[in-house]
């Protein structure tokens, strides 16, 4: 899986836009959230896996940068990459790009903590998946 992978693809519909005619903040957040779940699953934390383990991820910080506004009809793709990890957390970078213009529309750097859903506190990433994840950390472009 080395490198950034596609985690979302969609189109900006009229109901995604605000009164100023461009993609509204709440929909950027939703699109990045969908991308996040696809990314986590690709890292091995599938829905079945986390349900069986009684674990999950909780987001503790999300920094979104809006770069180029997206009007109705914009075709968007999000690519995601693991940029950092610790014993209990991961940091992923999600890049939203307009497929027609090539412009980066927005980025989201999200820190998520691995979480024991019964004990309600952070827990260590499982060794087997952490080893695979460590091999897939991407370098951020300058």
Image (spheres, rainbow, N blue to C red):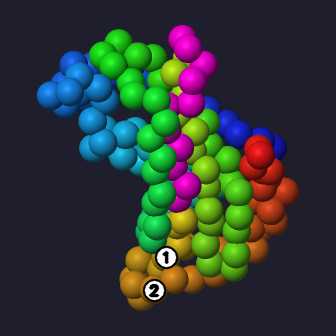
Farthest residue to the left: give it. Answer: 19
Residue 126, visible in the rendered structure: no
Give the numbered dot on residue 82: none
**Which residue is located at x 80 percent, y 62 percent?**
134
Give the numbered dot on residue 121: 2
Per the model, the C-alpha gap separating discs 2 and 1 is: 6 Å
Q: Is residue 39 left or right of residue 25?
A: right
- Residue 69 percent across, percent down from the top left: 39, 28
Height in image: 76 above or below 132?
Answer: above
The magenta region covers 100-110
The residue tagged with tag 2: helix, strand or loop? strand
To which quarter of the image does residue 26 belong? top left
Residue 131, visible in the rendered structure: yes
Dot 1 surroundings within 10 Å: few (below 14), some, or many (20 or more)?
many
- Residue 120 percent across, percent down from the top left: 40, 84
**Which residue is located at x 62 percent, y 43 percent?**
80
Q: Is residue 76 left or right of residue 1?
A: left
Q: Is residue 94 left or right of residue 56?
A: right
Provide the residue designation for mark 1.
Answer: 115
* Marks 2,1: beta carbons within 8 A: yes
Q: Earlier in the sequence, mark 2 or mark 1?
A: 1
- Residue 132 percent across, percent down from the top left: 79, 59
**Which residue is located at x 52 percent, y 59 percent?**
110
To which quarter of the image does residue 1 belong? top right
The answer to whether residue 126 is magenta is no
**Which residue is located at x 38 percent, y 24 percent?**
70
- Residue 27 percent across, percent down from the top left: 31, 38
- Front position in the image: 2 or 74: 74
- Front position in the image: 31 or 45: 31
Dot 2 surroundings within 10 Å: few (below 14), some, or many (20 or more)?
few
Farthest residue to the right: give it. Answer: 135
Height in image: 48 above or below 39?
Answer: below
């Amino acid at each position: 899986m080395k490198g950034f992978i596609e985690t979302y693809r969609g189109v900006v519909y009229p109901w995604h836009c605000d009164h100023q005619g461009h993609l509204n903040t709440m929909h950027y957040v939703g699109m990045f959230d969908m991308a996040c779940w696809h990314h986590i699953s690709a890292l091995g934390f599938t829905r079945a896996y986390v349900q069986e383990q009684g674990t999950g991820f909780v987001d503790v910080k999300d920094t979104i940068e809006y770069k180029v506004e997206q009007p109705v009809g914009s075709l968007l793709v999000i690519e995601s990459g693991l940029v950092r990890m610790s014993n209990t957390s991961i940091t992923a970078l999600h890049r939203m790009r307009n497929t027609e213009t090539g412009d980066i529309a927005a980025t989201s750097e999200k820190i998520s903590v691995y979480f024991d859903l019964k004990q309600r506190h952070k827990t260590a990433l499982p060794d087997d998946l952490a080893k695979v994840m460590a091999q897939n950390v991407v370098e951020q472009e300058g």
